[in-house]
Amino acid sequence: MPEPLYTARLAVRWSDMDELGHVNNAVYQTYFEQARIELFERWAGDGEAWPGAPETGPVLVAVEAQFKKPVVYPATVVVRLTAGEAGRTSLPLDCELTIEGDEGTVYATARTVLVWIDRATGRAVRLPDAIRQRLASG
């Protein structure tokens, strides 16, 4: 995996597990979402939740996940985000999920695509310059 843009460390909660005794597959999406939000908060200006807030913001338009190994409580998941090639309005982010202390084993991966929209109209807009600058600087 290329050098990550951001790495999030998130505690697995008891309630994340399902009756089969492992983290429910839907919860992985919450882990990926939290990592994206933390990345955007880091990139945002003062008082912003993400670059371009509050007039514009990201909408998840696609996600494809691969589950490789179950995660069980207790654990801390490590989510690494890397960017694909940004489009005019879209930002693909790849996610890799491992467990703290076992970073050599990939438990899940996902490819997500976000589109920046004008929150008033719901229409796609150009990615904020702040994001393009961050991507260019690595």
Image (tube, rainbow, N blue to C red):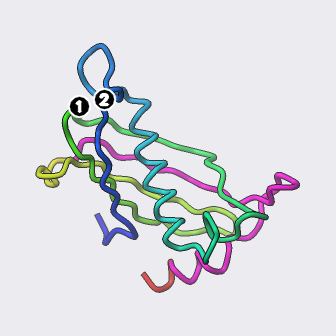
Residue 109 shown in magenta: yes
Residue stretch in magenta: 106-134
Instruction: Give the quarter of the figure containing the C terminus.
Output: bottom left
Q: Residue at x 34, y 58 (%)?
A: 8
Q: Picture quarter containing residue 35?
A: bottom left
Left or right: residue 28 versus residue 120 is left
Front disc: 1 or 2? 2
**Depicted 5 relative to depicted 67: above or below:** below
Residue nearer the viewer, 43 or 14: 14
Mark 1 highlights which residue? 70
Image disc number at residue 80: none
Q: Position of residue 12 (x, y in %)?
A: 29, 38
Residue nearer the viewer, 132 or 30: 30
Q: Residue at x 31, y 25 (%)?
A: 17
Q: Residue at x 58, y 75 (%)?
A: 131
Amino acid residing under circle 1: Pro
Mark 2 highlights which residue? 23
Instruction: Give the quarter of the figure containing the N terminus.
Output: bottom left
